[in-house]
Image (spheres, rainbow, N blue to C red):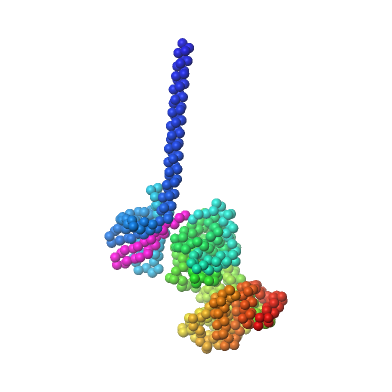
């Protein structure tokens, strides 16, 4: 009996062990199966997505025939065809109507119709969505045929945290060096995007600069993870910053960057219920051969951001000839000008131009920088004129400078022709003989044959007691008439005529030719923008009698005298080299 019972339990135990082993084997097999499946999925999907992202597809839409032909650029010999509705169904529900409307608008007579649109597209059977840039490259209005190039925009990568990106927030000087390095390349690439945080409603348009600055800093804090060694940021104003991306060279790359960063900023504003009070506008321009001066280049980007704020639904504008002549003196900026005047948001810096043989100050050049606004000084004054706010500008600019005069100091102000007309027509309560008004040669030449009588205007300014100066930034294509030039008390050569003077023989030849041409008028010629000691010494060796160089004196908020050691060095160099 015992043996029978023992055999029974042994048999049951063996049966349980077999079941356990079988269950373990099934679990192991299932685990291996799912593990292999997971590996296959992980390896295959990224490859599919990568292939989809890297491909550029060309669509040819035949609207009259309700069909679409397409091919991938990496497989140009494989031409496929499907229906027009199938083309639209590639996009997600929110984008389908936008794409249809865009295609319809391409055949309308609307001016400045956009040739590109960004949409979400499904890239695989899992309905994964990515951004795609559609650009119309050819339109046949008669036969209703459109050629569209499609580029998938990969997601913008970020660093692991915002702290690692902060080291790419750099100074304006370092930013300028990077810009110059890109500009000097034979094959230009890179783009600057200027971001402006602006108040939407008039009720907050007069917000304090500190408030706007704090908000701008918080916005920057949200996008620092996207900065890198090829994507740096610098601040250019209380409410604006510029990002320089050194690798971007196409519209798709530009949109990839800007859209990702704008989404982050808008998300932050919405999170704190600030999206109805503040907005973000972006102006961008690819670096080109004409973009030599960093200040004027950023000014163009700033103007584009203003255009984007007023005219673009998404608040983003890329430079094009169509929007280059946007009017910045609209009454829409009345509140911005009022806020600037109320807060006296102007910084004025003075740099002395000296007489070489005595190192005495000849004139102080004023650099007037508005802050807390997107406008430069000329735009501020012209906007103030158009909005009947000139008296306030007189107070915070002319009278502020006038208060600094103690002896015989004279200050050079850069102005435009409309500003000169307004000055002539008004009597400012300042010592006008202490002010020299500097005009640009190119602007005068363009308007020389217009209805305005330049000679009468210049004569009227001289009769009021103002001195007049004429600025040249390059060799003019055509000279002004002698009857115009005789009204100027001195000439200023700067910009492309003087920068990098020591190292560039072409600039040296142009400057020598210009000096020979304009010395016949027997007025001082000031050589400006001598940035280095080498440039200064070359100018002195060339017999330049009047010059402005940061190697001699840096800009200051007051009228500073030349350091005695530097003045002695300038005089001794001038005597030695001449």
Q: Residue at x 55, y 61 (%)?
A: 232
Can residue 391 be seen here? The reply is no
- 380 sits left or right of 360 in the view: left
Query: In this view of the protein, which residue sits in the foreground, 26 or 483?
Result: 26
Q: Where is residue 105 in the image (x, y as percent from the top left)?
A: 36, 64
Q: Of helix, strand and loop, which mostly describes the magenta segment?
A: strand
Dividing the picture into quadrants, the one containing residue 576 is: bottom right
Q: Which residue is drawn at 30% across and 58% down?
A: 67
Can residue 176 be seen here? The reply is yes
Q: Is residue 229 above or below residue 109?
A: above
Residue range highlighted in magenta: 133-155
Dividing the picture into quadrants, the one containing residue 460 is: bottom right
Query: In this view of the protein, which residue sits in the foreground, 63 or 111?
Result: 63
Locate the C terminus and report the quarter of the image it occupies.
Answer: bottom right
Q: In this view, does 61 lie above or below 509?
A: above
Q: Where is residue 361 in the image (x, y as percent from the top left)?
A: 66, 80
Farthest residue, direction left: 65
Farthest residue, direction right: 564
> What is the tally of numbered marks visible in this picture?
0
Q: Where is residue 568 in the image (x, y as percent from the top left)?
A: 71, 78
- 178 sits left or right of 151 in the view: right
Q: Which residue is drawn at 44% across and 46% down?
A: 43
Q: Position of residue 364 (x, y in %)?
A: 63, 78
Q: Which residue is drawn at 46% across and 24% down?
A: 17
Dividing the picture into quadrants, the one containing residue 102 is: bottom left
Query: In this view of the protein, which residue sits in the foreground, 485 or 317?
Result: 485
Magenta stretch: includes residue 152: yes
- 87 sits left or right of 464 in the view: left
Query: In this view of the protein, which residue sits in the foreground, 272 or 213?
Result: 213
Q: In this view, does 94 lie above or below 171?
A: above
Magenta stretch: includes residue 125: no
């Amino acid at each position: 009996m015992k043996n029978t019972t023992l055999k029974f339990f042994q048999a049951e135990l063996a049966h349980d062990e077999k079941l356990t082993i079988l269950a373990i084997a099934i679990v192991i097999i299932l685990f291996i199966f799912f593990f292999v499946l997971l590996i296959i999925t992980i390896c295959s999907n990224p490859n599919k997505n990568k292939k989809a992202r890297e491909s550029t597809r060309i669509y040819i839409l035949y609207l009259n025939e309700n069909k679409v032909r397409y091919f991938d650029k990496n497989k140009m010999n494989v031409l496929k065809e499907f229906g027009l509705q199938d083309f639209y169904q590639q996009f997600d529900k929110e984008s389908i109507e936008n794409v249809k409307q865009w295609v319809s608008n391409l055949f309308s007579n609307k001016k400045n119709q956009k040739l590109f649109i960004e949409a979400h597209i499904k890239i695989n059977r899992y309905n994964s969505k990515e951004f795609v840039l559609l650009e119309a490259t050819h339109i046949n209005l008669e036969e209703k045929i459109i050629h569209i190039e499609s580029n998938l925009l990969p997601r913008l990568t970020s660093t692991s945290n915002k702290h690692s990106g902060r080291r790419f927030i750099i100074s304006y000087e370092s930013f300028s060096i990077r810009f110059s390095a890109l500009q000097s390349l034979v094959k230009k690439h890179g783009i600057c995007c200027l971001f402006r945080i602006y108040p939407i409603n008039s009720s907050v348009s007069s917000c304090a600069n500190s408030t706007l600055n704090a908000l701008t800093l918080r916005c920057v804090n949200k996008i620092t993870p996207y900065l890198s060694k090829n994507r740096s940021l610098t601040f250019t104003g209380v409410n604006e910053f510029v990002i320089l991306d050194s690798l971007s060279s196409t519209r798709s790359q530009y949109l990839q960057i800007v859209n990702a960063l704008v989404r982050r900023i808008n998300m932050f504003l919405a999170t704190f219920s600030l999206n109805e009070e503040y907005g973000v506008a972006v102006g961008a321009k690819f670096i080109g051969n004409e973009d030599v001066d960093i200040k004027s280049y950023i000014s163009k980007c700033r103007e584009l951001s203003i255009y984007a704020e007023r005219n673009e639904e998404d608040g983003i504008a890329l430079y094009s000839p169509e929007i280059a002549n946007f009017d910045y003196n609209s009454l829409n900026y009345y509140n911005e000008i009022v806020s600037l005047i109320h807060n006296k948001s102007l910084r004025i810096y003075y740099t002395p131009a000296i007489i070489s043989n005595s190192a005495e100050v000849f004139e102080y050049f004023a650099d007037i920088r508005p802050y807390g606004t997107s406008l430069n000084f000329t735009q501020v004054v012209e906007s103030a004129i158009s909005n009947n706010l000139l008296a306030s500008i007189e107070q915070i600019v002319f009278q502020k400078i006038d208060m600094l005069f103690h002896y015989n100091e004279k200050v050079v102000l850069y102005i435009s022709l409309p500003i000169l007309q307004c000055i002539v027509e008004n009597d400012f309560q300042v010592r006008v003989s202490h002010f020299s008004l500097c005009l640009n040669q190119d602007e005068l030449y363009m308007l020389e044959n217009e209805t305005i009588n330049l000679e009468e205007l210049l004569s009227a300014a001289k009769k009021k007691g103002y001195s007049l100066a004429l600025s040249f930034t390059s060799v003019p294509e055509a000279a002004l008439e002698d009857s115009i030039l005789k009204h100027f008390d001195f000439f200023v050569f700067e910009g492309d005529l003087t920068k990098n003077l020591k190292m560039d023989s072409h600039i040296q030849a142009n400057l020598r030719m210009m000096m020979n041409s304009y010395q016949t008028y027997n007025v001082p010629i000031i050589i400006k923008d001598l940035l280095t000691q080498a440039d200064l010494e070359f100018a002195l060796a060339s017999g330049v009698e009047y010059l402005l160089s940061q190697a001699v004196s840096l800009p200051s908020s007051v009228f500073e005298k030349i350091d005695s050691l530097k003045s002695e060095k300038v005089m001794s160099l001038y005597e030695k080299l001449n």
